[in-house]
Structure formats: structure tokens, C-alpha cells
Image (cartoon, rainbow, N blue to C red):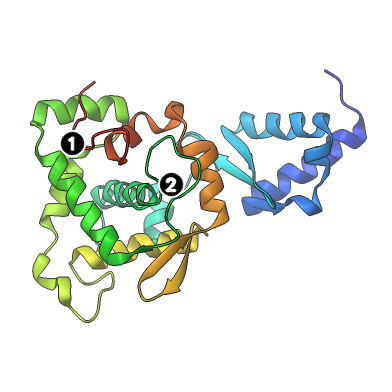
Amino acid sequence: MKYEEKTILESFEIYSNLASKGQCLIKDFTSYTIDENVRALVDLFADNVECTVIVSSENLFLIPLAVASPFHISNESLKSKYLTSKHQVSDIYLMYFAMIVFFGLFYDSYLTIEPVLEFVSMETWLNEVNLHIASLKEHDEETLKYHESDMHYNWLLIIEKWSLIDDINEKSKVQDGRTNSHVSFLNLVKNFMLGEDLINDIGNMEYELTEKAKDIIGHYFMELEYNRGILELLYKGENDANNIED
């Protein structure tokens, strides 16, 4: 299909803003929502770099769909910005696991679109991670390895990493990246989510989802095509978190 020069220029302006910032205000680029040709071309640009454009009430977001996408946060970038030199790949696996558990607390089913909670406390989050780790431990190694291949998650490494964290330091007054405790680790994950505008810190060690997070979860994270059945394993409600068998 041939596009007019004006359409191409408008589309590229929107895409270039998304590519540089990851998001932009709809009010600044209304042509994306009102001109189907502009929208189709922006979506095509995004698709060519293995991304998708998510529309919220106020923003457009550019979300990578694959590790190969140049807009995917690499392990090296994540470690340099949010973790410390001592952290390894296993910490990144555990980090994503803790985020999935955190998001799952806001929804009563992996098919729910709207959150059922307004905020989650650090204590609730910690308890939920412990519950899911305990649930995973109930399965034999062969079963966990089988689901590692289809879900692309190293469950055994996640269990091992969480188990190695020292509970003795759990009540330390300082819970930062240098403290080997579960709360300290969740603080690192919290800082990542704050830095990526996925949560707001409302005080008293309580956190709420941002509109960006809600839109990503509702339009992308809940899709079975992308979550590889992980939410069926972790979310409460219609699925038993203690059963990961097909």
C-alpha cells in the first residue's frame, strides 16, 4: 500500500518519539488514534523491531515482544542500572519471578482485566513469594525441568536462589543491595519497577500500580500467547497455584 508523504512523516514522528522515550502522550499525537493509515504505519514500524504499541487513556507505549528486540532491556543494562556487581543471571530470573508474583496480587484471576486491590504491602508481597516458592518445591525436579522449556523460566534456579538468601538478615534495619535478605532483594525489584514507572510508592512500604503497568498487564501480560502459561501457574482464582501439570 502506498502512503502519502504527510502520513509517512507523521507516522515516523510518532514512532521516533516512542523509540527514544518508550512512551508519548496521545494528546500530542492524536493522528495515531484518528487516522487508521498513520496507526497502521506506526504499528508496522514497531512490528519490524519486534515491538507492539499499547494505547492507554492518555499515553502510547512501545513494548518489546521478544528478547531480540533492540528495545528489550538487556541483562547487562538491567544489572548496571538496578543491581550490583555481585548479582548474577539467577538474580535476574528471581527478579522477574518476584515481579510476576507482585502483579498477580492485584488480580484475582489470570484472565482479570481490572485490578481488585488498590495497593500491596512489602509484607504481603514477601509472604506471597514465599508461598509460591514453597508450592514450586512440592514438584519433582523432572516436572520443573519440563516446564522450564515451555515457559522459558528456570524454576530450579529460582528456587535455589531464593532458598540461599539469608533469613537471619530479614529484620536488619538497613535493607539495601548489600544486605542478603529477602526484603533487601524485593527492594531491588521495587526500585526497578519504580524506575520503569510500573509502580508508585505511597508510603508505609505500600505500592500501587501505575496506569502504565495496568495497561501493559491488561493488553499484553494477560495474553497467553506471551505469558507462556506462567500466569496459570502463579495467579490465584480459577487456577490452582499448586498444580502446574498440563
Residue 28 shows in the view = yes
The answer to whether residue 83 of the structure is visible from this angle is no
The numbered disc on residue 136 is none
The quadrant in which residue 78 appears is: bottom left
Residue 12 higher or lower than 116, as above or below: above
Where residue 75 sits: x, y (%)?
38, 48
- Residue beneath disc 1: 242
Residue 141's spot in the image, x, y percent? Answer: 9, 31
Residue of label 2: 74
Instruction: Assess whether mark 2 and mark 1 are in contact (beta carbons under 8 angstroms).
Output: no
Q: Amino acid at mark 1?
A: Asn
Question: Relative to 100, does residue 233 appear above or below in the rendering?
Answer: above
Query: Element under label 1?
Result: loop
Considering only order in the chain, which callout, 2 or 1, is on the residue closer to the N terminus?
2
Q: Give the residue displayed 9% in from the left and 37% down from the top.
A: 138
Callout 2, which amino acid? Answer: Ser
* Residue positioned 24% across, 48% down in the render: 90
